[in-house]
């Protein structure tokens, strides 16, 4: 069908090549007559309504942060959908994206840089470079986007249409630790493609739905470790205009609008589920995987923290052998309270104190309470939100306990 989101075989990439002329003409018509833009504006209105609906009742601070969060999402989806430009025939460096000084949605780690490279699964790409001496995990971001996105009307049905058109619901079917792609744990040279390139090439598979090569670069110490240096080049000649064609722009607007609605809806419903069981940490693998999480290299527990007057939140576990771990606090919208530049709102294995029995005790309490405790994590003026505890490549995931305790029971001498 041209006039609905029923065709779910995957997005064709940047310029719609290979699609029926009818689809291309409908997209162009909807861009020229303004209906593609109207759909995007209606998606923004819908996303704002979701934020207003999901803000805790009576808390104006959460509502303020919610609308600020939405504007940040608009900026992010614009970069990934409107401004996206896939690599061409000349090699280009793959740039690392550090966490923002403040914010960062979806419990984004302050210890990680990210790699987000738009790709078109119709073509083959070669990635070359050096691994560096930091842990890097790569995956193929593959959302199920209708082939005819942008050719049909969405209007006020953006939220209802998420069941069949949600660019945020991406799986990462193929993922690797970067060193696994290097024969000498130093030099990198692999082909990113849907089909096996053969001829002894190192192959990183894509699917026909892959839109981005994504990566997590996890640091133990940013001051001493060297990140990877990578470059990417397209191996196939293809036309890529500097300015999108009208039909392409209609598709980009449609994907951006639905991605925006999908993000606020998916993460909002996840938060509400966690909020129904406050002050617990647990695995939520179905949700985590559905939004593109790659659990093959990490054990990641989530929860909703809620401080009470005169009490602190205590998280305890036996420190496992692992590549890295960190604990972080977020606001209600899963935006980090951690500012990696000032070290507040999170703690990791580099700085945490571990007792003689190998146990870690993390204390969440306002620093103005003048507590004499190790591993104090400041809530940065908040008393509720989402929290995350991640272990990267743990040998055995630990048992984690979470409890609310009176502040007076917390000095180090009482341990």
Image (tube, rainbow, N blue to C red):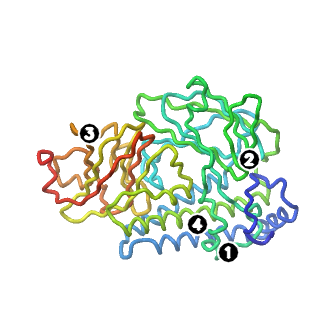
- Residue wearing tag 3: 358
Q: How far apart are the alpha carbons under marks 3 and 1?
A: 56 Å
Looking at the image, is mark 3 or mark 1 nearer the viewer? 3
Q: How far apart are the alpha carbons under marks 1 and 2?
A: 29 Å
- Residue wearing tag 1: 155
- Residue wearing tag 4: 261
Q: What is the secondary structure assignment of the residue under circle 4?
A: helix
Q: How far apart are the alpha carbons under marks 2 and 4?
A: 25 Å
Precedes in sequence: disc 4 or disc 1: 1
Q: Residues within 10 Å of mark 2 (few under 14, many from 20)?
A: many
Precedes in sequence: disc 3 or disc 1: 1
Q: Residues within 10 Å of mark 1 (few under 14, many from 20)?
A: some
Precedes in sequence: disc 2 or disc 3: 2
On the rendered structure, is 348 left or right of 5?
left
In depth, the one of 195 and 87 nearer the eye is 195
Precedes in sequence: disc 4 or disc 3: 4
- Residue wearing tag 2: 121
Q: What is the secondary structure assignment of the residue under circle 1?
A: helix
Which percent across, then down, holds residue 221?
40, 33
Which percent across, then down, holds residue 194?
73, 44
Up/down of 369 relative to 412, above or below: below
On the rendered structure, is 230 left or right of 148?
left
Residue at the extreme top = 184
Looking at the image, is mark 2 or mark 4 nearer the viewer? 2
Q: What is the secondary structure assignment of the residue under circle 2?
A: loop
In depth, the one of 192 and 286 nearer the eye is 286
Precedes in sequence: disc 1 or disc 2: 2
């Amino acid at each position: 069908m041209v006039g609905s989101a029923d065709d779910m075989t995957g997005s064709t990439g940047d310029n719609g090549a290979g699609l029926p002329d009818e689809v291309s003409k409908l997209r162009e018509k909807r861009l020229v007559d303004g209906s593609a833009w109207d759909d995007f504006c209606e998606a923004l209105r819908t996303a704002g309504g979701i934020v207003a609906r999901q803000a805790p009742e009576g808390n104006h601070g959460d509502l303020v942060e919610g609308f600020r969060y939405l504007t940040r999402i608009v900026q992010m989806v614009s970069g990934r959908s409107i401004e996206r430009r896939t690599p061409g025939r000349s090699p280009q460096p793959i740039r690392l994206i550090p966490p923002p000084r403040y914010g960062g949605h979806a419990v984004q780690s302050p210890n990680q840089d990210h790699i987000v490279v738009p790709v078109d699964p119709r073509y083959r790409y070669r990635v070359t470079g050096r691994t560096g001496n930091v842990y890097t995990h790569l995956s193929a971001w593959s959302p199920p986007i209708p082939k005819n996105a942008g050719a049909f009307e969405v209007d006020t049905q953006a939220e209802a249409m998420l069941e069949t058109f949600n660019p945020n619901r991406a799986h990462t079917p193929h993922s690797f630790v970067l060193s696994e792609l290097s024969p000498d744990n130093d030099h990198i040279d692999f082909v990113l493609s849907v089909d096996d390139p053969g001829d002894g090439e190192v192959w990183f598979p894509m699917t026909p739905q892959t839109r981005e090569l994504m990566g997590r670069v996890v640091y133990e110490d940013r001051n001493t470790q060297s990140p990877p240096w990578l470059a990417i080049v397209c191996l196939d000649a293809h036309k890529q205009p500097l300015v999108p064609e009208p039909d392409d722009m209609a598709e980009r607007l449609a994907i951006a609008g639905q991605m925006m609605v999908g993000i606020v809806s998916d993460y909002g419903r996840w938060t509400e589920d966690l909020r129904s069981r406050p002050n617990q940490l647990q695995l939520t693998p179905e949700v985590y995987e559905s939004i593109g999480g790659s659990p093959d290299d990490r054990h990641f527990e989530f929860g909703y923290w809620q401080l009470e007057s005169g009490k602190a939140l205590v998280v305890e576990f036996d420190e496992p052998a692992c590549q890295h771990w960190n604990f972080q606090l977020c606001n209600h919208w899963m935006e980090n309270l951690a500012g990696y530049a000032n070290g507040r709102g999170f703690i990791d294995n580099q700085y945490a104190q571990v007792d003689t029995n190998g146990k870690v005790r993390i204390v969440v309490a306002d620093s103005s309470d003048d507590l004499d405790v190790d591993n104090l994590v400041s809530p940065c003026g908040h008393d509720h939100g989402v929290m995350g505890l991640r272990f990267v490549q743990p040998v055995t995931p630990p048992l984690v306990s979470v409890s609310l305790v009176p502040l007076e029971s917390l000095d180090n001498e009482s341990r």
